[in-house]
Amino acid sequence: MPAERIVLDIGVAIRRRLAGFLVVLRDNGFRLGVAESRDALAILAGEGLGRAGMARGALRALLCGRRTDWERFDQLFDAYWLGRGVRQRSRPAASQAGAAGPMGGGSAGPLAGLALQAGRDGGSPAEEGGAAGQSEGASRHERLASTDFRKIADPQAQAEAHAIAGRLARAMRARLTRRDRAARRGRAIDLRRTLRASLPTGGMPFDLVRARRRYTPLRLVVLLDASGSMNLYTATFVRFVHGILDNFLEAEAFLFHTRLVHVSEALREKDAGRALDRLGLMAEGVGGGTRIGESLATFNRWHAARVIHSRTCVMILSDGYDTGPPERLGAEMAALRRRCRRIVWLNPMIGWEGYEPSARGMAAALPHIDLFAPAHTLESLAELEPYLARI
Amino acid sequence: MTAAFPRTEIADRLAAVGYVADPGLATALALMDMLKRPLLLEGEAGVGKTEVAKALAAVHRTELIRLQCYEGLDRNEALYEWNYQGQLLAIKIREGGDARQIEEHVFSERYLLERPLLAAIRRPTPPVLLIDEIDRADQEFEAFLLEILSDFQVSIPELGTVRAVSIPRVVLTSNGTRELSDALRRRCLYHAIDYPDVDREARILLARIPGIDAALALQVARLVERIRKEDLSKVPGIAETLDWAAALVGLGVSRLDADREAVFDTLSCVLKTREDRARITREVSDRLIGRVA
């Protein structure tokens, strides 16, 4: 009898701790449902208490859905289950402290930032979340102060940038619709449907049914330079990119300075203010030097295969001031060029009188660019419309 | 309630059929059986994703049914198709007969062509179903697959609903060509496979190449690891390593540093593009061999 009660107590404690862990994972972008919670519990029940090392692998296989999850899982797992002050004894009180401790603490490093970014919109249902939320507040404030995009440009111009992106998207969409209709005539006979249609005529295929051609909508991938030299333009460009994600059927956005950050998720937020907030949180370190070549290498290595298909236009918004070796940039641009349909480079410096693309990085990139255009004013962005419509 | 799953046992059984699994993968495979979920394997080409399914089939002594995905793959090609020629012929032969009977005859088991998915759920013993390179298929197909994988039943309008006789073990692989839907990812267990470390690759060589010397296997694994770190456009996978080791064994090479000539000449087993071949010059090759010897 007593033994049974102990098992029961342990069950409750595990359940609480597990719920807290799932909240942490969800806050970090893991997509988890009820079925995962149930299966995770089954795993822990099977593994027993205090064998975190054993359970880790099983939980990782269950709870991760993609490589980014996979790469962060161990860190999150350690922070939560093996973090400061949390030892094998998992009383509910201890579990709360454990959840908040590693997440809020400085030692968590990038983890804190990630939790922070996701914590804003998701809200934290479980009790652990409340404690974690409080410790987030302070650090969020610090980050915002250093990277607030909204402070720089006036709202009028930003709204305009958004509207221009919308116009570009519409120009391309019109093109898509036309393609779709033209394809409806079909290239090949659909044998299966033709024969089905022939049943009333005793197997005589009078009406030929044709297969509709599949089409791939044009996708726009934006790489936005958010380095110090671009400071004046960043705010407007971010709004522009937000508009693109808002209006295009398919679009992805990345931001780079000294490293590359995938920001599509943050910018999908409908409310512009909130989107910019989230972006600010993700773009830690904005304003530093630019390593365009390296950022492109990261893009080519880890993201290109996923976000680029045969009908993809890559749009780079940058002044081309690269602190890395120009050969690197040239090579990465060449690799990128092989993958996508078009590369458009928008450079705010072109609009300046007497500007020559003499920056060594820019010169190295130039041979691989399909369209090199100014982007210093809103009009110059709007002028892209006819070009994009033709792709 | 569930007993601890026999992870080490699975690893041992995989090793017995020549697949050297890392502990994470063994865990995931054990979980597959415990939770009855499909397993999604992601990783670059050549890390041995497809091999996992083959090894799993060997371990369970069951059939491997493979569905290779490609752009434009639709449910007919994956699930079932009617034998139209046969049907037309039957209709012609019975012309003038009772239309209803003809229809029943024509849409019977006899003219049904099983494709991999239907085959997988109609086997009496659960097979291993490998859905290879799911990222190449279109999104519509993925959605359809989701339906099959959750219910393990399909409805064929002319025949009615076909329920699974046995639930297959499902392995999906992806190279990351396209982002997969969250719904599919959530349904699956997940394991990311990377290139093996030196030790594991050496053990793979020992398991798969008959007559290979342990010292040579280790040298080859170390050299391949070095080569993977070079700036190549096509990084060699495990299959390439196996080919190469087999070639070296075939040529009677026992130590890489003793036979640099043969190593350089057989580099084409691992370097598959002209650029890469040009990048690893004789000097580079010698330098690399020097490091691993």
Image (cartoon, rainbow, N blue to C red):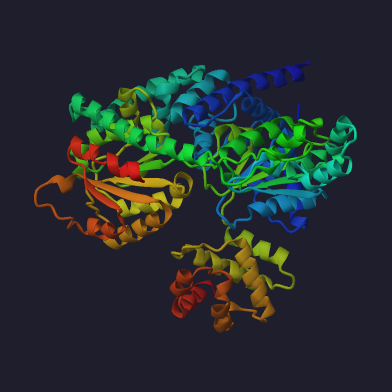
Residue B166 seen in the current view: yes
Q: Residue furthest left?
A: A353
Using the rendered view, name the quadrant where residue A270 is placed.
Answer: top left
Is residue A374 found left or right of A51 in the rendered image?
A: left
> In which quadrant of the rendered view does residue A359 lie?
bottom left
The answer to whether residue B251 is above or below residue A384 is below
Which quadrant is the C terminus of chain B positioned in?
A: bottom right
Residue B124 visible in the shown view: no
Residue drawn at x 69%, y 28% is A42
- The picture places residue A29, in percent across and down from the top left corner, at 48, 31
Give the residue displayed 21% in from the left and 42% down from the top.
Answer: A375
Q: Nearer the viewer, residue A352 or A206?
A: A206
At horizontal 45% and vertical 22% (from top left) the residue drawn is A122
Q: Is residue A166 left or right of residue A308?
A: left
**What residue do we see at 47% from left, 49% from top?**
A305
Q: Position of residue A335 (x, y in %)?
A: 39, 58
Of the pair A239 and B79, the residue shown nearer to us: B79
Which quarter of the rendering shows the N terminus of chain B?
Answer: top right
Q: Is residue B118 left or right of residue B202?
A: right
Q: Residue A200: percent from the left, percent from the top?
A: 76, 32
Q: Describe residue B114's horizontal placement relative to residue B226 as left or right.
A: right
Q: Nearer the viewer, residue B59 or A188?
A: A188
